[in-house]
Amino acid sequence: SAGATANAEPAKAASSPAEPIPVDPAAAAEAQRVLDLVLSVGEECQTVEDLKNLLAKKPNFTCYDGFEPSGRMHIAQGLFKAINVNKLTSVGGTFVFWVADWFALMNDKMGGDLSKIQTVGRYLIEVWKAAGMDMDRVRFLWCADEITSKADTYWPKMLDIARCFDLDRIKKCCMIMARAENKLTGAQILYPLMQCTDIFFLRADVCQLGVDQRKVNMLARDYCGKVGIKLKPVILSHHMLFGLKEGQQKMSKSDADSAIFMEDTAEDVERKIRQAHCPREEAADAGADATPGEDAMHLVKDGLQNPCLDYVRYIVFGAP
């Protein structure tokens, strides 16, 4: 009827498909370059999707690494670290070094003398400057000073992390040797809890430590899941350079011939390289794939385990 026609709803116009958002080829290429450069720092990234999201939403991201001032600096901590820091700061990152003087104290480094530990910390900073680390976007924060001045923020967070995990999970993040010998001190139990707390205390977007610190960094991601934090820290774990002697999965500060140290003379460097383990063929039992659940120093298969090739790849050709 005429009335029905009058009351009828007007016909809806047919919807047309949404126009695709144009992609700027130059911007896409730059985004891929930045992603590739950041990924080149790590042997593993947890997770690549989280990293892509971070770089898209927060180009001025914050990276963190903590170090114990505990003696001489070898080439991995010196040159290799400087190379990785320069890569990250060159694409907009700010790198925060957590000078872990209290952590060194907990591990009884420098005889438990905090003054000596802090002197070593200042020495390490000067070595990085001499090694070519670009300091424009690098900050050094001292653990003892920062925690003391912001105790009302730090300790409640640590207690909250502690309540979320049982003792077995925390012990898996502790020092391998002390754990294996069942000789963990109370301080060494607190150590991973404080390491995990540091990540949130420093508001780190990217945890850029070695593969040997993977477990405690993953603890931080798991904590986010337990308490509903959506933006989890990205874990960018760098390769652990092999020690110069056969069978050494990483360098050792207690073995002067396991690595080149930053204050070695030219004669020291030549002697160490000439006598270094340098296999041409894979060992029959070498290079097994490591799984994240093991106390592994490497997550990528390397049948040769040749420290000389490690130096060439990550030190000589490592810079962008």
Image (cartoon, grey):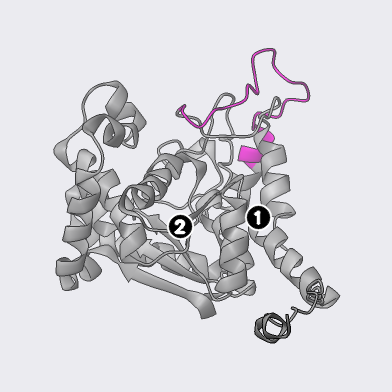
Camera-side residue: 157 or 99? 157
Q: Is residue 8 above or below residue 35?
A: below
Residue type of the residue flagged with mark 1: Leu
Q: Is residue 78 above or below residue 10?
A: above
Q: Is residue 72 above or below residue 57?
A: above
Label 1 neighbourhood size at 10 Å, few (<14), some (14-19), many (20+)? some
Residue 99 in sight from this viewpoint: no
Is residue 293 part of the magenta span, yes or no? Answer: yes
Q: Quadrant of residue 165?
A: top left
Read off the residue under disc 1. Answer: 39
Camera-side residue: 172 or 132? 172
Residue type of the residue flagged with mark 2: Pro
Is residue 167 part of the magenta span, yes or no? Answer: no
**Residue 191: percent from the left, percent from the top?**
25, 45
Residue 188 in sight from this viewpoint: yes
Mark sitting earlier along the chain (2/1):
1
Q: CA distance from mark 2 to mark 1?
A: 15 Å
- Quadrant of the image for the N terminus? bottom right
Read off the residue under disc 2. Answer: 233
Give the magenta range: 271-294
**Residue 286: percent from the left, percent from the top?**
65, 19
Eye-nearest disc, 2 or 1: 2
Camera-side residue: 223 or 17? 17
Left or right position of 158 against 218: left
**Residue located at (48% from left, 51% from top):** 209
Left or right position of 232 against 298: left
